């Protein structure tokens, strides 16, 4: 699992939360966010690529607790532009083994 230390979350007025992360090699495959209601979320980008969103902003937490979907923007640091964007489901669980001891 990889920690995503430098990410942003955009709160939109009418749409889902937008997670802005650095771009990664390859294409996402059945991506989703696993969330237990706490201050961390797990982003499954593909079968072999898991990313941890550490310490969510307190304004994001109640919105993510209610979210069914989110948007992911992958940014290329060199180009300073969005190179991939896609919708993901937010799967809500009571317990997330990846974030329980954080």
Image: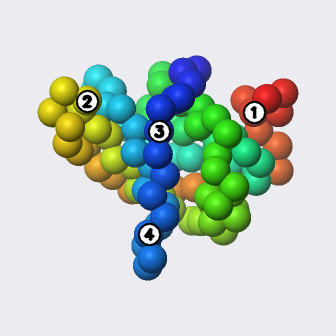
| Percent position of residue 72, x then y | 39, 49
| Percent position of residue 74, x then y | 32, 40
Whether residue 47 is visible here, answered yes or no, is: no
Earlier in the chain: of badge 1 and badge 2, it is 2
As measured in the structure, the alpha-carbon distance from the residue carrying label 1 to the one carrying label 2 is: 28 Å
Q: Report the label total.
A: 4
Contact? badges 1 and 4 (CB < 8 Å):
no
As measured in the structure, the alpha-carbon distance from the residue carrying label 3 to the one carrying label 4 is: 16 Å
| Percent position of residue 48, x then y | 48, 22
Disc 2 secondary structure class: loop
In the picture, the quarter occupied by the C terminus is top right
Q: What mark, if any, has residue 7 been given in the picture?
A: 3
Q: Residue at x 40, y 38 (%)?
A: 21
Q: Residue at x 52, y 29 (%)?
A: 4
As measured in the structure, the alpha-carbon distance from the residue carrying label 1 to the one carrying label 4 is: 26 Å
Earlier in the chain: of badge 1 and badge 4, it is 4
| Percent position of residue 60, x then y | 62, 58
In the picture, the quarter occupied by the N terminus is top right
Q: What mark, if any, has residue 12 been given in the picture?
A: 4
Image position of 66 with respect to 57: above or below: below
Earlier in the chain: of badge 1 and badge 3, it is 3
Q: Which residue is mark 2?
A: 77
Q: What mark, if any, has residue 69 been given in the picture?
A: none
Q: Nearer the viewer, mark 1 or mark 4?
A: 4
Q: Which residue is mark 1?
A: 99
Disc 3 secondary structure class: loop
């Amino acid at each position: 699992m990889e920690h995503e230390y430098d990410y942003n979350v955009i709160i939109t007025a009418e749409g889902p939360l937008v997670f802005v992360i650095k771009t990664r090699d390859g294409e996402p495959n059945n991506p989703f966010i696993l969330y237990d209601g706490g201050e961390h979320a797990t982003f499954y980008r593909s079968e072999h690529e898991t990313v941890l969103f550490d310490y969510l902003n307190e304004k994001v937490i109640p919105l993510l607790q209610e979210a069914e979907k989110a948007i992911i923007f992958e940014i290329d640091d060199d180009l300073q532009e969005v190179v991939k964007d896609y919708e993901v489901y937010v799967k809500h669980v009571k317990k997330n083994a990846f974030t329980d001891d954080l």
